[in-house]
Image (cartoon, rainbow, N blue to C red):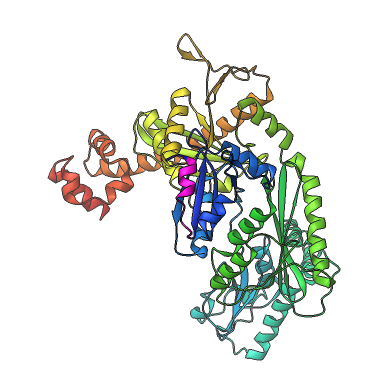
Amino acid sequence: MNLIETIKQLPASAGIYQYFDKDGHLLYIGKAKNLQKRVKSYFSFTPELKPNSNLSARITKMINQTASMNYIVVNSEHDALILENSLIKQLNPKYNILLRDDKTYPYIYIDNSKEYPRFEITRKIIKSSDIKYFGPYSVGARDILDSIYEICKLVQKKGSLKSKKICLYHQIDKCLAPCELNVSKDVYQKEIDLGIKLIKDKKLLIETLQQKMFFYAENLRFEEAGELRDRCERIGRSEIKSEIDFATNENYDIFVLQHSDQRAVVVRIFMRDGKIISSTHSYIMLNEGYDEDELYQRVLLDFYTKNKPPIIAPILVASDFIYIDSIKSYLSSVFGKKASISVPKRGKKKELIKLAILNAKELLKSDEKTQNIPFLYDVKELFSLERVPKRVEVFDNSHLGGMATVGAMVVYDGGVFDKKSYRTYHLEAKDEYAQMRETLTRRVESFSKSSPPDLWVLDGGATLLKLAFEILESYGVFLDVIAISKEKIDAKTHRAKGRANDIIYTKNDIFKLKNSDKRLQWVQNLRDEAHRSAINFHKKTKLKMDKESKLLTLKGISEAKIKKLLNHFGTFEALKKLDLEEISSVLSPKDAKTIKNIYF
């Protein structure tokens, strides 16, 4: 069915629609309360099908590339909203804006129902009317908590009260020891009140920590002094400084957007009890132009739909946006109470918006060098990429004679390696091609939890590049991929240190750049980091396998039999889960029984 026929048959129902180009690549995912009305609004039908004249330049460009479309009917506008957001995260369409900063932020809480309560950290609601929350904190939550226990004489560990014996913390004057001593609730409450005061007043907290830091330094306890110095720095980083005084106990969540031609930034500020307690920001690359309406929707959905927040505050934004009523309605269902989203026009709330915008503008100015943006645009142009490769995932595999086979994924994000996002995989496949297929397939299947990057880089040649595109296409994801392999001389890999003439493969070209070319060196650096990660994980896996092999050998299972088991079942972890009959299918019943006796 062609595009115009599909449009004519659209139902007047809620749903999502998907636009594809002539090659079947997904261009855009949108939602609609009425699919028929929404999709038709993009087009003019006479004298021929073309983009509507009132569309933005970005959307006009998209419609000109649209060759076909699909749609999914759902029960309500709410369902369309959530399905759209989920599919965008998984499929990364060319014209949608994707936010990758969808982490949850921690809160500090105290359970006042306990006889001697303690401060702890959580990222979700704990069902109790006696819980009091403080936060959220973008950075520094653990530092604030550690500082409270450094200053206040509270029960330091969960299990301390159960022991009924005074421990070291009382001896070093960090706990009142209610586990054994007769400590009145009033005396203990004074320490709780001090803790709450320090949590709410970061300036006082930092000043108190600095006093302890100077004491440690004067007594030549430099390591402890240095730890407190670093902690003060991290706590101070978690908020935007402001002279705005509400003189009330108002709470607000503030979201503002600013953009340049190449990037956008979202700034989030959290005000609690009339004071700004923390702030955070995220950068978004603009591959096909800026759309504030869509970006505000993404920002609010990503922040609030993980879990109901422990503290529900009115939401302030810098400007109105399309579907604001739909977002309000959906968040009301998440919160269990009416959600408030407003655009302040005057007064102190307007001053908060101005403060957030000022910080957003400064972030855009200062970020270009650290994010390596001009260079990344140069890489995009050379390799004819669809997106600026700000976030890159790089893959390599490692094994030794088919043993301890592993895969590794390292992540580069805006100029630095994001080591928290690294992943490693135990693989069952035996040859290089099948290993890469297994690694990439497992990553694609996790896109629903962790969105696709801008670019994949593979350690390999044209064959593995073709494999990657086939895997992505089978899952409906379009993603830029390049591969890098070492130059071969007389059928042997040339590994001249510092002068390696590596070859880069893209979908349509092969590049043999000079070894002094910065773009080649950039790809080589990515590949080398993935190789290092894969080798390190392989070594750890091999060491663990050697220990397991030694254990089996001591019980009479030969190395040949161990290798036979691993070739068949893959890993020792898989072997441990098997029953007697499954092991007997490879070894004798006697050997199978020996193995079962070792592991159980």
The segment highlighted magenta reads: 3-13
Q: Quadrant of the N terminus?
A: top left
Q: Position of residue 7 (x, y in %)?
A: 49, 47
Q: Nearer the viewer, residue 46 or 524?
A: 46
Q: Looking at the picture, tell me which residue is in the foreground, 457 or 58.
A: 58
Quarter of image, res 382: top right
Q: Is residue 518 left or right of residue 70?
A: right
Residue at the image point whose x is 69% and y is 47% from the top: 290
Camera sees residue 296: yes
Q: Give the residue displayed 53% in from the left and 23% down from the top.
A: 508
Which image quarter is the C terminus in? bottom left
Viewer-side residue, 294 vs 432:
294
Relative placement, left or right, of 254 versus 385 is right
Q: Residue at x 75, y 42 (%)?
A: 261
Compared to residue 19, the image places residue 351 above or below, namely: below
Q: Quadrant of residue 550?
A: top left
- Residue name at image x 36 percent, y 41 percent: 545
- Residue 435 highlighted magenta (yes or no): no
Residue 154: x and y, percent? Answer: 64, 78
Against 155, residue 567 (above or below) is above
Where residue 531 sits: x, y (%)?
52, 32
Nearest the eye: 148 or 520: 520
